[in-house]
Image (tube, coloured by chain):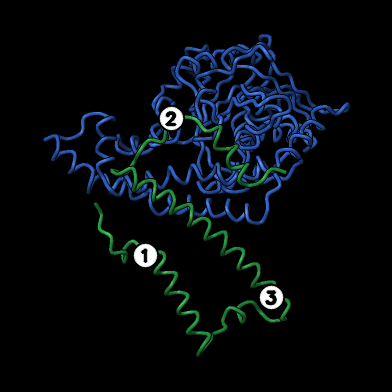
Amino acid sequence: MRVRDLQHAVLPRVTSEERSRQEAVVSLRRLLNTRVRPQNIDAYSAEGLPAFVEANGRQPQSPDEVQEAFLMSPRYRRWSAANRAAQEMIWVSVGEPTYRDLDRMTQAAADLIDAPQKLGSLTLDPDYDPSPEVADLDIHLQPGGYGMDRGEHDVVAGALYECGGNVFSFGQGIGRGDSKASVIIKLLESDYEGFVPGKMLDMGCSAGAASAAYAAHWPDAEVHAIDIGAGMLRYAHARAESLGVAVHFHQMDASALTFEDDSFDLVVTHNVLHEIGADKRRAMLREALRVVRPGGVVIHQDVDIRRPPSLIHQVERDWDTHFNGEAHWATYATADLIADMHAAGFPREAIVEHDLAAIHGANRWYAISGKKPG
Amino acid sequence: MTSSVEALTSLLATARGNRPQSMANREAEDVLNITLAVLVELAVANDRIDRLERMVADLRGEPVEELRDLRYEGEIAQQRQEATDALLTRALRIMIDPRAQS
């Protein structure tokens, strides 16, 4: 199943003008990413570093000082300002059609959620206060953030996430045919030959794109998915029902699962590691191991920012921490995930890091996997 | 159906956090933001013109390239030149305006 640019009942219906605006933002971001951002290291060397040395009489000594030196480069500052503006424009370009078409979308979601004959299910927890570590931030500047819930039948957070994610990804050079779920399925086929899950869990599922893709790929599997926000989960559930796939969505914290031990054959996360701090990450890794059965597989996939060639590149990559609401971008990029997986309970020999090619486009993904002993 | 302005206002009402400054001058950064937004709107307008050109070409039964290749001479060319001059005067007004920065 394709996951990007897919039509379903809960998606905002965009006008030609709105589509043009989204495509223009994609083009602007593509130009910034392919033609301007690659100059940042040169801008640092030619402008930022000499300015820092002149002001301080020495080279930068720490990531903070390298960041300070970057910001002494006019070229870098110009790119940074333009990149931030373009990121905000992503949300304007998808937010306008979302709120304009919201009455219809809300009704469409309600019809799907309240339908007597459903394939999957939705279990919200009114007593759960979405993790402030994630919910209190507008991560990647998404207005209202992942946890936004505007009341009964609200689906805005999910719509913004799916539509904004597409505009972001296409501007990032990620192909329309790419799918993080397909990347993981391909990894399972190559590294865990013959492994087919009967029951799986997708943690931090957001708008449910990967969850639905897994359900479509393994129609006999029981697919469960969790996230923190009711607005995100209602959208994900209605989206899955509209696409005709069975996914069971739950409002739950990945670091405190309510599932029984050994419940799943496969546990996955997509782009969750970079959204949470170290304590929550370690708790999530422990929980993933706890709920997967002996012989089952856990795979955490995320963005490919963990192998910068130098500190300068690392700080350049860390723009998202300072300007894009990605509070844990550097936390993730520099974490010792093998040590964390081992501390969670995986034997070292069962832990593997993967450098994965995207299914479509030149992008690469990082993943770390572990097989539970037994 | 919510209007576009209401939709944009609803969206902006939910945005949280600060906007960290990149450029040395905040006003310059604000102007860059506005300029990029206008650039996107120009792309939207160009798409709309393109659609109309294709529809007109279709109605005339000719390739759209032929329609776009129309060249005007004389009075019409003069009118277009004057319109372009006026547009540039509006856009670059601050470089022509005699008022000094205080």
**Mark drawn on residue B92:** 1
Q: Foreground mark, 2 or 3?
A: 3
Callout 1–callout 2 Cβ contact below 8 Å: no
Residue that label 2 marks: A329
Q: Amino acid at mark 2?
A: Trp
| Image location of residue A133, percent across then percent down | 50, 20
**Mark drawn on residue A291:** none
Check the picture and name the quadrant holding the N terminus of chain A: top right
Mark 3–mark 1 Cα distance, whole angstroms, equals 33 Å
Callout 2–callout 3 Cβ contact below 8 Å: no
Q: Colour of chain B?
A: green
Q: Foreground mark, 1 or 2?
A: 1
| Chain of residue at mark 1 | B
| Chain of residue at mark 3 | B
Letter of the chain in blue: A
Q: Nearer the viewer, residue A84 or A326?
A: A84
> Tag 2, which secondary structure?
helix
Q: Amino acid at mark 3?
A: Val
Disc 2 packing (10 Å; few <14; some 14–19; many ≥20): many
Seen at 43% across and 30% down, the residue is A329
Left or right: residue A47 compared with residue A288? left
Callout 3–callout 1 Cβ contact below 8 Å: no
> Tag 3, which secondary structure?
helix
Mark 2–mark 3 Cα distance, whole angstroms, equals 50 Å
Q: Amino acid at mark 1?
A: Leu
Residue that label 3 marks: B56
